Image (tube, grey):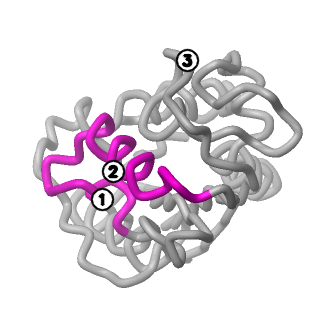
Amino acid sequence: MDLIFATHNTNKVKEVDLLLPNDIRLISLEELGFHEEIPETEATLEANAQLKADYISDRFGLPCFSDDTGLIIDALNGAPGVHTARYAGEEKDPEKNMEKVLKELRNISSREARFKTVIALNFNNQKLLFDGIVEGTIATKKIGDEGFGYDPIFRPEGYDQTFAELPLQVKNQISHRGKAFQKLINYLTKRKRF
């Protein structure tokens, strides 16, 4: 089965490709020659994920899924939340985003946070949502050089390392994205229509 992943983020494509069974072929937007930016104009992660999946499904007529992820920091009243990718500006610069979070938490000892991923799947004329959450804390500085996004400052619950220090296989087992994608994969595997 061919399944489009509606993202331009090559790191996400690599992570997800490792999780998929061999009978599902992941197609990236780059493979399709689609380089447009899909506007994320909705107020929730769920609505943004669905917006992107609908946009690509309508355009290419193939099964498609999209995700939206938010970093939710309690001391910042849930920010950056739905604005996670653009927290420090429209250029979506991960370094600037992390710097902004670290600056805002500089004198705050309570650093509880969670990542939430929502996946919207358009498949067999159905629209389905899957989510995954990982609890953790925000480190006081960037540590590690693996992963992407906020990985160098997010320490998952039960671990002394940040996501950027953990091997990808470990991160995939415990991460918000890994949990959400496992729900997606379980659903697709049970369908047996491909």
- What is the crowding at mark 1: few (fewer than 14 residues within 10 Å), some, or many (at least 20)? many
Label 2 secondary element: helix
Q: Write down the region rendered in magenta.
A: 83-108
Residue 138 in view in this figure: yes
Residue 22 versus residue 194 in the image, above or below: above
Identify the amino acid type marked 1.
Tyr
Circle 1/circle 3 CB separation < 8 Å: no
Between marks 3 and 2 in the image, the one whose residue lies nearer the viewer = 2
- Residue 42, image x, y percentages: 32, 81
Residue that badge 3 annotates = 144
Question: Extreme bottom residue here?
Answer: 43
Counting from the top left corner in percent of width and height, residue 95 is at 31, 34
Q: Amino acid at mark 3?
A: Gly
Q: Is residue 67 above or below residue 75?
A: above
Q: Which numbered disc, 3 or 2, marks the residue that appears first in the sequence?
A: 2
Q: Which image quarter holds the N terminus?
A: top right
Viewer-nearest residue: 70 or 140? 140
| SS for callout 3 | loop
Distance in Å between CA atoms under marks 1 and 3:
21 Å
| Depicted 99 relative to depicted 52: above or below | above
